[in-house]
Amino acid sequence: MRVLQVMAGAAHGGAEAFFTRLVTGLGRAGLNQRAVIRSDTRRTTMLRDSGIDVAEESFGGLFDWRTQRRLRQHIETYDPDLVLTWMNRATRHCPRIEPAKRRFVYAARLGGYYNLKYYERCDHLIANTEDIGAYIKEEGWPPSRVHVLANFVSPGTLPPLERSTQATPDQAPLVLALGRFHRNKAFDILIDAIAKLPDAYLWLAGEGPLRRSLENLAAGKGIGDRIRFLGWHDEVSALFAGADVMVCPSRVEPFGNVVVEAWAHNVPVIAARATGPAALIKDGSDGLLVPCEDSTALAAAIRRVTEDADLAASLTRAGYARFQQDFAENVVIEKYLELFDYLVRDRNETDPMRPRQRSP
């Protein structure tokens, strides 16, 4: 089987990071793939170092006809059994080929509640949460053409990042948060919570348009000396290894990769009740949930976890068990391979004029 993966994402982001993990994981499992991505030296290098065939295209605005022509050429030369586009921009650039003339199954992967007008030409949609899958069906998609497959993460093996490198006392409660500096992530609420915890330090790993305003907010609250802005990290295991608790304070979070990453790294989790974390976490068992935009409740939850070693250990054990059961790489990769096989086989069985034999 040949799969053409098309991603036009940003330089950083949860979906973009999972794209890289999934493509390389499928490659390790033996799947023949070509990845077509927006020009990005770092991502291209990571994929090629993993043995993936990579092509870079511009994926520009509405008048970027070249990318659509180039994608048509990739389809003609690579001759995929399945084309999988990621999110709106990549899907919009996919060339219009009439279903009767297509020699491939066309699927798209959604990690949010996107406008489905971009996906009308797709045969199937893949959501990464049950709630997104339900949204797609409510918008009129037949249930047989909607599939739900979770993200996976890989547990890290790096030693902890030395606190001394970030001017952080060894005995101070250390809170970790990761993500794009965007309003949806609600890092302003987390900074307000840290202001209510005089001994706690915060490591914020990420980048985005709100960095300067978050730095100013921390300074204005007089806690700039207890918050470290670490920039974007492709390898986060050293950060998790040194943290006492991971917090996901998001206002809007369709899934919550950071929750699963914390579980995989044996770090207790606290999250706001955004859709994704609320669906993932069993409150009081494998994590703690607090109301969205409630810095007082968030501060109280951080205090509970950092002051109660038994609670922290219990949350950690249950979270790691959830990771192993539902979000380990081998579990999710197997489900993707099964789905790809089903989609292609079903297409061939329902339209016997399309199957073809390739030379080995």
Image (cartoon, grey):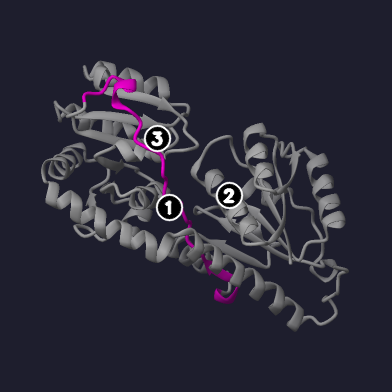
Indicate which label's residue lies in the foreground, 1 or 2.
2
Q: Say if 72 sits above or below 103 in the image.
A: above
Q: Secondary structure at mark 2?
A: helix
Q: Is residue 47 above or below residue 40?
A: below
Q: Which residue is mark 2?
A: 19
Location of residue 352 (image quadrant): bottom right
Q: Which residue is mark 1?
A: 254
Q: Are marks 3 and 2 in contact (CB under 8 Å)?
A: no
**Secondary structure state at the residue bearing disc 3:** helix
Q: Quadrant of the rendered structure where residue 188 is?
A: top left
Which class describes the residues within 10 Å of circle 1: few (<14), some (14-19), or many (20+)?
many
Kind of residue sitting beneath label 2: Phe
Does 14 sit left or right of 226 as displayed? right
- The one nearer the camera, 62 or 69, is 69
**What is the C-alpha distance between the residues marked 3 and 2?**
23 Å
* Labelled pair 1, 2 in contact (Cβ < 8 Å): no
Residue 2, percent across and down? 75, 62
Vertically, is 300 above or below 215?
A: below
User: Could you tell me which secondary element the residue under label 1 belongs to?
Assistant: loop
Q: Which residues are magenta?
A: 143-169
Query: Crowdedness of circle 2 by 10 Å Cα count: few (<14), some, many (20+)?
Result: many
Q: Does any portion of residue 33 appear in the rendered image?
A: yes
Residue 160 included in the magenta stretch of the image = yes
